[in-house]
Amino acid sequence: MSNQIKRLALAWMAILALNAGAEAASLKIATLAPEGSSWMREMRAAGDAVKTATEGRVELKFFPGGVMGNGETVLRKIKLGQLNGGAFAASELSSVNPDVVVYGLPFQFSDLDQVRSVRARLDPQIKAGFENNGMVAAGITGGGFIYLMSTQPIATQAQMRNTKVWVPEGDAIGRIAFEEAGITPVQLALGDVYTSLQTGLIETVGNTTTGAIAFQWATKLKVMVDLPVSYTVGILALDKKALDRLTPADRSAVMDSIGQAFARLEVSNAADDVATRETLRKEGIQIITPEPAEAEAWRAVGRRTLERMRKDGLLSPAILDSLAQAKAAAGSR
């Protein structure tokens, strides 16, 4: 009888061990996106899809609204193992993969079709750069074109030089571009822009039409120049070590679910850009088309900025060559 009890005890221990091993793996992901935003809706949908596909073995646990800190803080927490990933603006990931900011080069793109054609070639190259540095770009989605907006007249570069221009802290591309245009920008964190527009510390900013409304900057602005400055992308980057701890099937489920969610975001973000442009117009913001000579002067700033980035080694020759080739294939000017 005692042997039978021992066998039963061993059997229960085996069952308990299996159950312990079956505990869900949790991927902890931080984002600045607030709860209820389209970003969070799609990321939570991805989390539901992952849980279903893995039969509960993997779950995505999100920390929205910036509760885990800014991009730099989130990256540090990923390195320490306190987080497993985050949703970032491209510039926030330049320390991991410098080439990720290539779409932020100024005045390189004329329309969304051109961007899509270029991204078909460059996105895989950018993703490979993350793999080489211990992270995985699980999803890349377009956030729209950035435009220059101001409380003052900015139809020409000369007019803009007479305004106080904002550039995000740590944004090397923006700083170099404005220097090439003869402008010394004011560097501020994103969270300080609204108050600085109120006080007059800054007068000219760059943002997407959607972002200008979401951050309430539009309530302070009077004019927007209808010339795409740069293209912004959002990236969900995960720690490669955390992914490697999953089975191949579960890892595939995570990547597929996030990829599908970001593809849906791509569509909704493009639609939002169209709608919010009209919202800006209805709220009294004047949308002006620059004269051809002014547009070409800004494109010349873009070319000089690109060459400085190449000369200073801030972007790899490989990604810049790929950009030029992809634009040529897309029929760019």
Image (tube, rainbow, N blue to C red):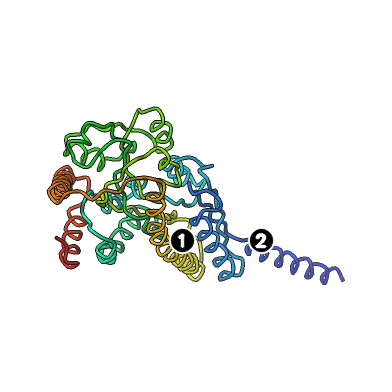
| The C terminus lies in quadrant | bottom left
Q: Residue pushed farthest right? A: 1
Helix, strand or loop at label 2? It is helix
Task: Between residue 279 and residue 140, name the one nearer to us.
Answer: 279
| The N terminus lies in quadrant | bottom right
Q: Is residue 218 left or right of residue 132?
A: right
List x then y, in percent, for residue 279: 41, 52
Which residue is at 41% across, 31% downward?
Answer: 198
List x then y, in percent, for residue 247: 51, 67
Mark 1, residue position = 244
Task: Between residue 97 and residue 288, name the one nearer to us.
Answer: 288
The three-letter code of the residue at mark 1 reads Asp
- Does 122 sit above or below residue 280? below
Mark 2, residue position = 20
- Does 194 sit above or below residue 328? above
Task: Between residue 88 and residue 205, name the one nearer to us.
Answer: 205
Q: Is residue 176 left or right of residue 282?
A: left
Which residue is at 24% across, 39% downward?
Answer: 154
List x then y, in percent, for residue 96: 34, 48
Crowding at label 1, few (<14), some or many (≥20) Cα neighbours within 10 Å?
Answer: few
Q: Is residue 2 left or right of residue 237?
A: right
The three-letter code of the residue at mark 2 reads Ala
List x then y, in percent, for residue 196: 39, 31
Q: Find the distance from the CA under tag 2 to the CA under tag 1.
A: 19 Å
Which residue is at 17% across, 46% downward?
Answer: 298
Task: Between residue 84 and residue 50, name the one nearer to us.
Answer: 50
Where, by quadrant of the figure, is residue 320 drawn? bottom left
